[in-house]
Image: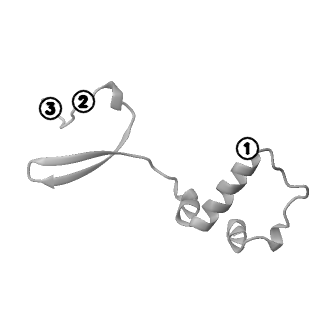
Amino acid sequence: MELKIADSRGRVNLGKEFANKTFLIEKTGDTEMKLELAAVIPERELWFHRNPEVRATVLGAIEKLRAGQFAEMPPDVDAEEPWMKELED
């Protein structure tokens, strides 16, 4: 455990290892707070993270590319998954 003192503006220096990091701060009691490192997803990318079917399709395609498995013909976007049409809107 380490003692830190807030400055006159209420700031506490966590040290260089936490510089430029994003945190969730939860007040857990009158004298306690919990800090948790967080990652922020841009709103325009949330559709990808909220749809497990889309993620599985995209990540599967990435694995095929890494294995050197390339499509012989380009995909027929009109006949593809319904979620692809959402991207056009």
Front tag of 2 and 1: 1
The colour scheme used to paint the residues is: one colour
Query: The disc labelled 2 sits on which kind of residue?
Result: Asn
Instruction: Return the residue found at the far left.
Output: 30
Q: Earlier in the sequence, mark 3 or mark 2?
A: 3
Mark 1 = which residue?
A: 66
Mark 2 = which residue?
A: 13
Query: The disc labelled 1 sits on which kind of residue?
Result: Arg
Q: How many angstroms separate mark 2 from mark 1 (CA)?
A: 42 Å
Report the front residue among 68 and 1: 68
Tell me if 61 is positioned left or right of 10 in this view: right
In the rendered image, the vertical position of residue 34 relative to residue 87, given as above or below: above
Helix, strand or loop under label 3: loop
Task: Say which quarter of the image contains residue 67.
Answer: top right
Helix, strand or loop under label 1: helix
At x 28% / y 26%, what residue is drawn? Answer: 15
x and y percent of residue 28 in the render? 16, 54
Front tag of 3 and 2: 3
Question: 10 Å neighbourhood of mark 3: few (<14), some, or many (≥20)?
Answer: few
